[in-house]
Amino acid sequence: MNVTVCVKQIPDPALPGELDPSTNTLKRDGKLILDESDSYGVEMALQLVDAAGGGEVSIISMAPNGEVSGMRTALAMGAAKGVLVSDPELGGSDALTTAKVLAAAAKRLGDADLIIAGTESSDGYTGTVPEQMAEVLGLPSVTFAKSISVEGGTVKVNRQTENGYDEVECSLPVVVSVTAGVVEPRYPSFKGIMAAKSKPVDTVTAADLGVAPVGWSGANQQIVDVAKAPARAAGEIVEDDGEAHLKIVAFLENLKVI
Amino acid sequence: MGINNIWVFAQEANGAPSSNTLELLTKAGALGGSVSAFVVGDASNIAAALGQYGATKVYSTGDLGGQLPGVAGAAAMKAVIDGGDSPDLIMFPQNYEGRDVMSRLSVKLDRTVLTNNVDVAVDGDAVKVTTPVFGGETMVTTTFTGSGPFLAAFRPKSFEAVAGAGGAGEVVSAPVPDLGAAGGAKVTAVHVEESTGPKLDEAAIVVSGGRGLGEKDKFAMVDDLAKILKGAAGASRAIVDAGWVPYSMQVGQTGKVVKPNVYIACGISGATQHMVGMKGSKHIIAINKDQEAPIFGVADLGIVGDVHKVMPKLIEALRGR
Ligand SMILES: Cc1cc2nc3c(=O)[nH]c(=O)nc-3n(C[C@H](O)[C@H](O)[C@H](O)COP(=O)(O)OP(=O)(O)OC[C@H]3O[C@@H](n4cnc5c(N)ncnc54)[C@H](O)[C@@H]3O)c2cc1C
Ligand SMILES: Nc1ncnc2c1ncn2[C@@H]1O[C@H](COP(=O)(O)O)[C@@H](O)[C@H]1O
């Protein structure tokens, strides 16, 4: 079974985010890392290919500046190869354009049995790209997967819902988006990290894939204002001296909720 | 021209329109023009209530028969639009069904989507939406360019729901057309997790626990405190992912948005993705052993202390009353 996984490469979320004052979009010029949201998809794909007893995991990513460091992490975990779409024209692309680009990248790899994405990216969190990609490809999709298994050409998914979960079945090929925490992503081994350095990453532009327009011109949206939100007034901070719970009791009493 | 015709993606929850739906209908009505509700499913239980909140027309696909709402809902909407009844703006809730329908529809219409919004304004032909970024520190306002229908998703509790004097909306059938290969996924079983006490997103008091509780069993302290205060228990994603509590208890960007009178955060660091779900609470109390924890930045009362010491004493003190 061949599985294609979308992996987004993002600025380290541990660093404070910043908007580029000229475009008002998130700055993405530093080193990028593999989005944690996608590490679950990579792990899930590796486990499914293992269980199927054959095939491979490929990864696709759209990123500025020919960035591959996040992709190398996925390759080090065990993915076999990747397609990177990198193009200065892509800056400012909206979710729909991203989905069109990723769909074209998936096609370039050939027909996968299963395409996996994250439920939402850590920095964009539109949560729309996987379902949009499925529609572009004319494929069925199952979003918000908590677990995935494949048996004889049919995928079975437990799909998270507002107050429980649904069991969903679909024949392959299909796009599935996985929620965070579904599996425990493996740490790349030293051997994996070394091997990843020589795994092939096919780098192409949006034009190579025939996707146009991209970037700002394809986005159909324009930022008109950026403002600081009003800050909350500072509260009272107390160190627990063994009696701090009484502070809470008094606070609740004062609000007349007890 | 102008924004004359607005659709609201409408959902049912326990036999009534969901609170998201009523919030969006109210806001849509305030923007002017006519408002229709689009129900992906059978609308018969809720059409009257939707009318009360301003929907003059209620589109209904009828029962989905195991189809997932995303693919079925988008196809049904596209069919109505192709039939000539096209809206200028469609407002979706930022939740599972809303996101999926909007995503599929955006491709069918080749229109951008603007997500995670908390406000909307109409200015002539332009629709502007406002989105918080960096955990709500900065507000970005974006306008759609090109032509409609404009597609926008709004976080729960962005608007107040106010019933009007409208009569029952006229129900219009909007059947799901043949979906072809894209309709291949089928729901074979539905599992509902039972919950007791007030609903998390409606409770006046919410007590939430995070990784600082240390282990699953300690969540009982959160449950106890919530029960004593007649509130609901919530959680950070860290302990939902760890399997301590079900997803339905998650507060934050990917979980529920809560705006209770009192929010008590126990052993929660206050990551931006958690804060966007609870920052709107009237009063916030935090217990965390790290005085640098970001949660203290929004707390009205912050206790720098160990949850294992403070919470049992607090529960004792409240129980004795
Ligand atoms: C795309 C995306 C979406 C997300 N959506 C959500 C969401 O919807 N909701 C959400 O909550 N998170 C969400 N997150 C995750 C979020 O970034 C944080 O990882 C998560 O909120 C952390 O949970 P926590 O505060 O319980 O754990 P931690 O960050 O590990 O914090 C634990 C805290 O407990 C304190 N502590 C430890 N021991 C004690 C003790 N004995 N007594 C008192 N305090 C103690 C520590 O000082 C620390 O501050 C999302 C992340 C991403 C990338
Ligand atoms: N630029 C990208 N490159 C690769 N995958 C992406 C990209 N953007 C989004 N995705 C995929 O789509 C998922 C949802 O992203 P989003 O819609 O931005 O929340 C992510 O978890 C990824 O799997």
Image (tube, grey):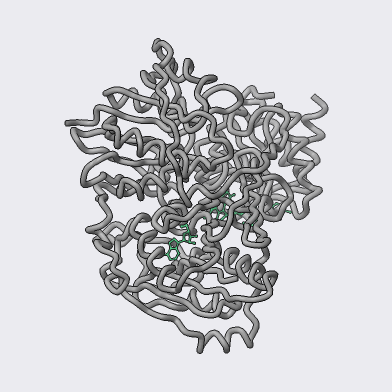
* Residue B282 appears in the rendering: yes
B75 in relation to A98, above or below: above
Q: From the viewer's perspective, tell me whether residue B77 is left or right of residue B262.
A: left
Looking at the rendered image, the quarter that the N terminus of chain A falls into is bottom right
Name the quadrant where ligand 1 sits: bottom right
Q: Quadrant of residue A17?
A: bottom left
* Residue B134 appears in the rendering: no
**Residue at the image point whose x is 42% and y is 45% from the top:** B116
Q: From the viewer's perspective, tell me whether residue B321 is left or right of residue B209.
A: right
- Count up the numbered dots: 0
A227 in relation to B207, above or below: below
Estimate the x, y position of residue B122 in percent, counting from the top left: 25, 33
Q: Quadrant of residue A95?
A: bottom left
Q: Quadrant of residue B302?
A: top right
**Residue at the image point whose x is 52% and y is 52% from the top:** A141
Estimate the x, y position of residue B112 in percent, counting from the top left: 32, 49
Estimate the x, y position of residue A16 in percent, counting from the top left: 44, 62
Q: From the viewer's perspective, tell me whether residue A24 is left or right of residue A10.
A: left
Closer to the camera in the image, B301 or B76 = B76
**Residue at the image point whose x is 48% and y is 43% from the top:** B70
Estimate the x, y position of residue B57 in percent, counting from the top left: 37, 21
Closer to the camera in the image, A254 or A49 = A49
A75 in relation to A239, above or below: below
B260 in relation to B272, above or below: above
Looking at the rendered image, the quarter that the C terminus of chain A falls into is top right
**Residue at the image point whose x is 34% and y is 33% from the top:** B80
